[in-house]
Amino acid sequence: MQRFVEKIVSMMKSEGLFEWQGGPIILAQVENEYGPMESAMGAGAKPYANWAAKMAVATDAGVPWVMCKQDDAPDPVINSCNGFYCDYFSPNSNSKPTMWTEAWTGWFTAFGGAVPHRPVEDMAFAVARFVQKGGSFVNYYMYHGGTNFDRTAGGPFIA
């Protein structure tokens, strides 16, 4: 994982894609929703999360790093929320911004299955309530998705 992250950050730097270089990348993420899995992962889970955070910061990307659903993300990494509603969420430090990295506009579906519907009014209200309670960043996830035939995009299918 370290070689992969270092390679991606290096490529982004060489292309001038980070905000400090005039590019569009304003933050980066390492791991995703690992926190809720820690209890199932055993004794190595917490040290791994800490290692991943420190490794990411050491790449010197020049933008903040986030870990979604990692309540105890080590400084300077920012814990962020995802889901349908995040107005209850607080970051892992009072000095960090309250961020909603996955404001779900819908829900994933099995190929050929029914498409869940979330009224736009509910999404707008959820975002307004999040901002009213101190939220500072919202990423809508996702307006239009890709194709995942037969649900093969995740485990146990590894490419």
Image (spheres, helix red, strand yellow):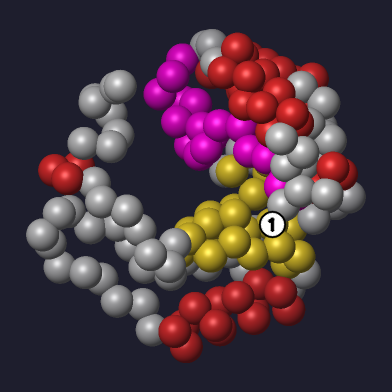
Amino acid at dot 1 = Met
Residue 124 x, y percent position in the rendering: 55, 83
Q: Is residue 156 above or below residue 84?
A: above
Q: Looking at the picture, how far across and down is residue 129, in whole percent?
A: 64, 79
The answer, for residue 9, to whether it is visible in the render is no
Residue depicted at 76% across the width and 65% down the height: 136
Determine if residue 89 is in view.
Answer: yes
For residue 31, above or below residue 142? above
Q: Which of the image's four quarters has the N terminus?
A: top right
Q: Is residue 32 shown in magenta?
A: yes
Residue at the extreme left of the image, as rendered: 112
Front-most of residues 134 and 42: 134
Left-right relation of 54 to 145: right
Residue 9 forms part of the magenta stretch: no
Residue, disc 1: 99
Q: Please tell me how many numbered marks the rendered image carries.
A: 1
Residue lying at the far bottom of the rendered structure: 121
Q: Which of the image's four quarters has the C terminus?
A: top left
For image coordinates 29% across by 22% down, the residue present is 158
Instruction: State which region is magenta.
Output: 25-42
State whether residue 66 is above or below residue 81. above
Indicate the secondary structure of the residue bearing disc 1: strand
Crowding around mark 1 (Cα neighbors within 10 Å: few <14, some 14 to 19, many 20+) is: many
- Give the residue drawn at x 71%, y 23%: 10
Would residue 77 be found to the left or right of residue 8 on screen? right
Could you say which is closer to the camera, residue 9 or residue 40? 9
Using the image, determine if residue 56 lies above or below residue 115.
above
Q: Residue at x 55, y 32 (%)?
A: 31
Please indicate whether residue 92 sits to the left or right of residue 142 in the image: right
In the picture provided, is 107 more to the left or to the right than 66? left
